[in-house]
């Protein structure tokens, strides 16, 4: 038992070091969705005497959007900010949305300015950084982040384990009753093996950070350039400046995204037409619609994510099969 506890606390140290916080501000969860739920609901219920207004955006993960909708049914008021074609909010609109009843701003991993605005208005700031950890350097103090969610498998750790950072002093209610684990916030036996794996994975992710990002950015840029030169009538969704290094989301005009996926699957290629959490749904991505992509193009979107094990040869194979599959579907 002592050995398991020691291993768990060593993992807590590694996670805390990665985002610049103290060990006691790290709480282990089952993943990003649980972390998001505890952050948003926990803060909402704990601070209800101060106000009932929450600000988020239209492009958040369902773990945030559905949590906010659940809170609306319990008397909370939620503002869903619009975003531009690059998926960025207007900081002036954010500031104007804040009222004397605003208790929380929750926006997918964001820049320092959002944290500054929240702090100036004495509003707590939560960020869902599930996609950013391992791809972007994060310092919760410099960025004025009060709560932060992450999920282990996004940086090559085990699935089914995550973390919620809560700045010391922030009031946040627990969502489930039981034992006294995680300093009374999250009852239930800790997933020690998963937590230890996550601690090691995040250490490796930031140890090889520069090299990893450089490799993925190079593969992504090569892929996008080749697709633009070899396939007509394509649209790159989102801007390039703030794009994660391994991400490429492209819409193919007059092509059905699901049929495109099936064609690529037959060639041994794994991709998606939306995020993993909406797999199996036939509706276009709410994120693409929110950044102004017409539904006709959103239905033809293909999201490819490059990773550590991919090579230029993999990308060339993908391009070759994608060119043939798109041509076949259009014909």
Image (tube, helix red, strand yellow):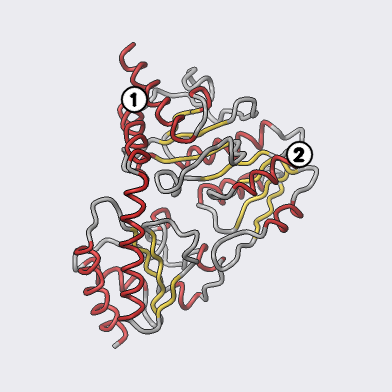
Q: Nearer the viewer, residue 207 or 120?
A: 207
Q: Residue at x 36, y 57 (%)?
A: 246
**Residue 56, placed above or below residue 204:** below
Residue placed furthest toward the bottom: 331
- Crowding at dot 2, Cα within 10 Å, few <14 / some 14-19 / many 20+, comes out as some
Q: Are marks 2 and 1 in contact (CB under 8 Å)?
A: no
Q: Nearer the viewer, residue 72 or 315?
A: 315
> Badge 1 is on which residue?
192
- Crowding at dot 1, Cα within 10 Å, few <14 / some 14-19 / many 20+, comes out as some
Distance of label 2 from label 1 (alpha carbons)? 37 Å
Dot 2: element: loop
Tell me the number on the disc at residue 51. Answer: 2
37 left or right, relative to 304: right
| Quadrant housing residue 161 | top left
Q: In the rendered image, which quarter contains the N terminus? A: top left
Dot 1: element: helix
321 left or right, relative to 113: left
Q: Nearer the viewer, residue 253 or 186?
A: 253
192 left or right, relative to 181: left
Q: In the rendered image, which quarter contains the C terminus? A: bottom left
**Residue 309, placed above or below residue 322:** above
Query: Measured from the top left, where is residue 242 in percent x and y?
Result: 50, 59
Query: Measured from the top left, where is residue 69 in percent x and y?
Result: 61, 50
Query: Measured from the top left, where is residue 233 in percent x and y?
Result: 40, 83
Q: Residue at x 36, y 52 (%)?
A: 213
Query: Measured from the top left, where is residue 300 in percent x and y?
Result: 40, 74
Which circle's residue, 2 or 1, is located before the other in the chain? 2
| Quadrant housing residue 217 | bottom left
């Amino acid at each position: 038992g002592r050995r398991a506890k020691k291993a768990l606390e060593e993992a807590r140290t590694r996670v805390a070091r990665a985002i610049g916080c103290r060990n006691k501000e790290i709480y282990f969860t089952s993943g990003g969705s649980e972390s998001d739920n505890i952050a948003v609901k926990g803060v909402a219920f704990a601070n209800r005497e101060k106000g009932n207004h929450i600000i988020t955006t239209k492009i958040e993960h369902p773990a945030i959007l559905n949590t906010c909708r659940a809170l609306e049914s319990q008397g909370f008021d939620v503002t869903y900010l619009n975003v531009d074609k690059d998926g960025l909010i207007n900081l002036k609109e954010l500031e104007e949305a804040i009222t004397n009843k605003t208790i929380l701003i929750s926006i997918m991993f964001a820049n320092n300015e959002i944290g500054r605005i929240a702090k100036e208005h004495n509003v707590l700031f939560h960020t869902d950084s599930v996609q950013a950890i391992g791809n972007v350097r994060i310092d919760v103090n410099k960025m004025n982040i009060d709560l932060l969610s992450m999920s282990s498998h996004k940086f090559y750790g085990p699935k089914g384990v995550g973390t919620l950072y809560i700045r010391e002093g922030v009031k946040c209610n627990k969502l489930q009753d039981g034992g006294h684990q995680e300093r009374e916030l999250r009852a239930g036996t800790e997933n020690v093996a998963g937590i230890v794996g996550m601690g090691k994975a995040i250490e490796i992710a930031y140890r090889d950070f520069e090299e990893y990002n450089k490799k993925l950015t190079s593969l992504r840029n090569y892929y996008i350039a080749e697709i633009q030169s070899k396939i007509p009538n394509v649209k790159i969704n989102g801007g390039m400046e703030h794009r994660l290094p391994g991400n490429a989301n492209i819409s193919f005009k007059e092509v059905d995204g699901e049929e495109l996926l099936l064609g690529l699957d037959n060639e041994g290629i794994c991709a998606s037409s939306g995020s993993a959490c909406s797999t199996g749904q036939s509706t276009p991505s709410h994120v693409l619609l929110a950044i102004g992509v017409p539904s006709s193009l959103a239905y033809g979107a293909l999201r490819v994510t490059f990773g550590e094990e991919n090579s230029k040869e993999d990308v060339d194979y993908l391009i070759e099969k994608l060119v043939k599959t798109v041509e076949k579907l259009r014909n």
